[in-house]
Structure formats: structure tokens, C-alpha cells
Amino acid sequence: MSEFPSRRDNLADGPSRSYQVRPDDLEGAVRETLSHRVAVARPLGVDPAGQAIRRANRIRRRRTAAGLALAAVTTVLLSAGMAQLGAETRRDGPPIVVIGDPDPTSRPFPTTSVPGPGPAPLTPAPPMVSVTLVDADGRRLVLPDVGPAEQAQPLPNGGGWLVVGAQTTAGRSLWVVQNDGLVQVLLAGAGAIVLAPDSLQVAWRDRGDLLVAGVVGTQLIGAVRTPVPTAAEPVGFVADNVLVRLDPAGAGHTLWRPGAGPLPAALDRKSLNIYGRLPDGRLVGQVATSDPDRPCLAVLTPTRYLEPVRTGCGPHLSQDGVGGVSPDGRWLLVNGMTGKVGRSLLVDLQRLGPDASTVAAGPPATGAIVWSDATNASYLDGDGELVRVDVGQTRAGEPASPTAVPDLPAGDRPILVKGF
């Protein structure tokens, strides 16, 4: 037998626990307990709504500050732009400069307004015409739809031609005529325009400034400008420098290197015309003397001060500036006089001096003189006929005679080029 007497599970003296609970009562009790727990609000460690409100306030403040800063910058830029616009409009209307103009045939030809207060009448542009190029062999190439022109050079990439317009009441123009016939206007209403020998640069006069730009494809890029005296104008290139004539009515030239400062001070007051460049870089030109009717030839150093290093005062030279140096630097073909008759003269630059060797070469030249090689040159005379000069024949006493350009329309004056 057990040492302990048996006893009941419920040690308390009271009624026994009842296990008779209906499912509905149990479900109701559970629901009531859960509802009491849900009704009690428990504090949260993080307030999501407060965080969202604070974040929105920060974003609104940042946007407000950014808007105020942008408004301030815009105000400054607009003010500067209006000041620049005011400064530009005070000038007498800059010429039209078109960079990479894709197709000017869809609109009227550019015109230039006449300076003056208030609305100004427009100066009509010259009519569109065809320009005929001719080479030393008499071959012709017709460039359509450009204005009156006086110079043409092939593009650097060989895809067409740079054509410099003649002086008109609307100024000068510069066109690109591509081989496919497309004509583009690069400059209009400009002053004097000159091309580098390799066609990689263009210099032109724009009111009181001289500008230089590079030719890339069919566009002008990287323009650089500098103020110049009233009468100064570009007349050519010497390497990367622009040769500037200070006064077309007087003597004096200077060289300007774009991007290296303003136009140098006028130190040269003797040079009248520059005919070309020798292989060593020196220039051949015409200088003034004590006799205004008898200028001399000179070899000049290509510095700001074009100092003569050798002169020759034998030939009787014209002062029209027409002349050209052979590629090897031996010969100069230049306009002058034999007796009282105007002629083109062939000068031996190796014997430049009092006894300079000079012979008559043909009728007076107009426009450019083109050397095909060291002993053959061509030019057009006053009637637009082609003159071919052979150095050997000329020195033997046989001057060149002009010949008509084949199949040239009546009244059409061609432009002489080196070749097609």
C-alpha cells in the first residue's frame, strides 16, 4: 500500500472546475480579448508620417533656393546679353557672316542695310550670274549661281571652289561652290577679302576690325578679330601672318599674327606693293623713293618692319600692284613701262640692282598672275584675253601675244586659276 493517502486534484475547497464550454462562448471570449488588445494604443519607435512631412519640407526649401538662384543667374545673363546687344547695335550694322550655311537657294540672296538711324533702305544684292574659270591651257569651268567675282581658289579638300566676289555697293561676298553644284554663302557685305595660298585661311575687313578664320570643309571656324586703322585692309598671307596694307593711298605694310595680340604699330612707311614670297621667306615688293613716279623693287624681310635688304631701281614700274614671283624665286613678272608704252616686264631677281635684267614680256596684266612652273606664267590682259609667257622665249626677244579664250560668251570676263 502507498504511504500517502490519495487526494483530489483540486486542493481548494470549492466547487469543481467545469470543462463544459460551448464553442460559441469560446469564440466570443477570444474575440473580446483581441478587441481589448487592439483598442490599447502602443507607442511606436518611428513616426512615418512625421518623417514624410519633414522630408517634403526639406525638398520644398531646396527647390525654392534653386529657383531663386536660377532666377538670379538668368537675370545676370539677360542683363549682359542686353548690354552686348546694345553695344552691337550701336555699330553701323555688321556684315552678314554665315557659318556653314546649308542651302541658301531656298531664301533671297543676303543684303546689307545702309548705316543710319531708324529704318534703313536695303541695298539690293548683285544678281546671280555664272562665273567662268580658265586655266593656262584655255580650258574653261563654269560655276553657276554666284554674283560677280574676281578671284577663285580650290577648296583645301578639293571638293569645290572658294570664290571671292567683286566690290559692289553691298560690299564683297565669299562663296563656296561645291563640285555637286551646291552654292553656299560664307560672307556677305564684307570689305576686302583675301585667301591664303593653300585656301586654309580667309581674312577680311569688317567695319573697324580685321578678322581671320580657318576653312574646314565648307565652313569658316575659329574667327579671330582685331581693331585696325580706318584705311587698313588685308592684302595677303605670309605663312600664318596676315599682310596688312596700312593705307592704300600711301606706303606702309605690317604683319599681324592672329591670336598674338593687336595689330602691330606702323613701323614701315616705304613699301607700296608686295608681289610675292621667295623660297627663303623673304618678300619681293615695291618701295617708295624720293621720286614718287619712280618706285624701286626691293627684297624685304618679313617682320613687322618690312626692311629692304636689296633694291633695284632700274625698271620703270607701274604702281597698280599687279605682279607675281616664280616658284623658284628667280623671276618677277610685273607691270611697268618700256619707253612710254605700258607693258608687262620680266625681271631677273638674281640680278636685282642698278643693272637689273628686265625685258618686255607682253601687254599689261590685269588680275592675278599665275605661274604654272618656274619658267611659264599666264595672265589676262585688259580685254580678258589669255597671255602665256615663256621665260626662254621672252628673254630671246619674243614677247607673248594675247589669245582669245575658246568658247567664251561675249562680254564674259573669266577668272584665271592655276588648274582644275
Image (cartoon, helix red, strand yellow):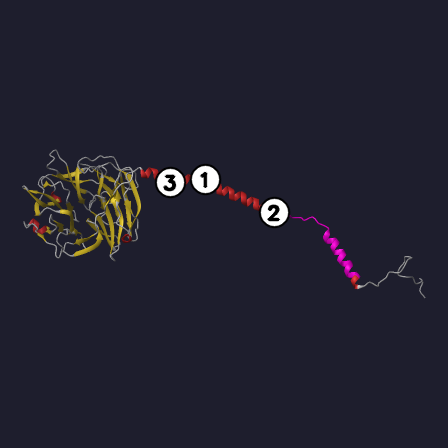
Q: Identify the residue at image location x=34%, y=38%.
A: 86
Residue 51 has which mark?
Answer: 2
Residue 184 image point, x, y percent:
27, 52
Residue 372 has which mark?
Answer: none
Q: Nearer the viewer, residue 53 or 284?
A: 53
Residue 360 shows up from this direction: yes
Q: Gap in Å between the C-alphas at discs 3 and 2? A: 45 Å
Q: Amino acid at mark 3?
A: Gly
Indicate which disc, 3 or 2, sits on the residue closer to the N terminus: 2
Q: Amino acid at mark 2?
A: Gln
Going by the image, does 184 lie left or right of 12? left
Question: Label 3: how many residues lie within 10 Å, few (<14), some (14-19) or many (20+)?
Answer: few
Q: Secondary structure at mark 1?
A: helix
Residue 390 image point, x, y percent:
10, 52
Vertically, is 311 above or below 131? above
Query: CB atoms at circles 1 and 3 under 8 Å apart?
Result: no
Q: Secondary structure at mark 3?
A: helix
Q: Determine which residue is flagged by label 3.
A: 81
Q: Main secondary structure of the magenta part?
A: helix
- Whether residue 38 is in magenta: the answer is yes
Residue 226 image point, x, y percent:
28, 39
Query: CB atoms at circles 2 and 1 under 8 Å apart?
Result: no
Vertically, is 7 above or below 343? below
Q: Gap in Å between the C-alphas at discs 2 and 1? A: 32 Å
Query: CB atoms at circles 3 and 2 under 8 Å apart?
Result: no
Q: Identify the residue at image location x=14%, y=45%.
A: 323
- Whether residue 317 is in magenta: the answer is no
Q: Tell me where the magenta segment starts and ends, as one range.
A: 25-51
Q: Determine which residue is flagged by label 1.
A: 72
Question: Label 2: how many residues lie within 10 Å, few (<14), some (14-19) or many (20+)?
Answer: few
Q: Gap in Å between the C-alphas at discs 1 and 3? A: 14 Å
Can you tell which of label 3 and label 2 is closer to the viewer?
A: 3
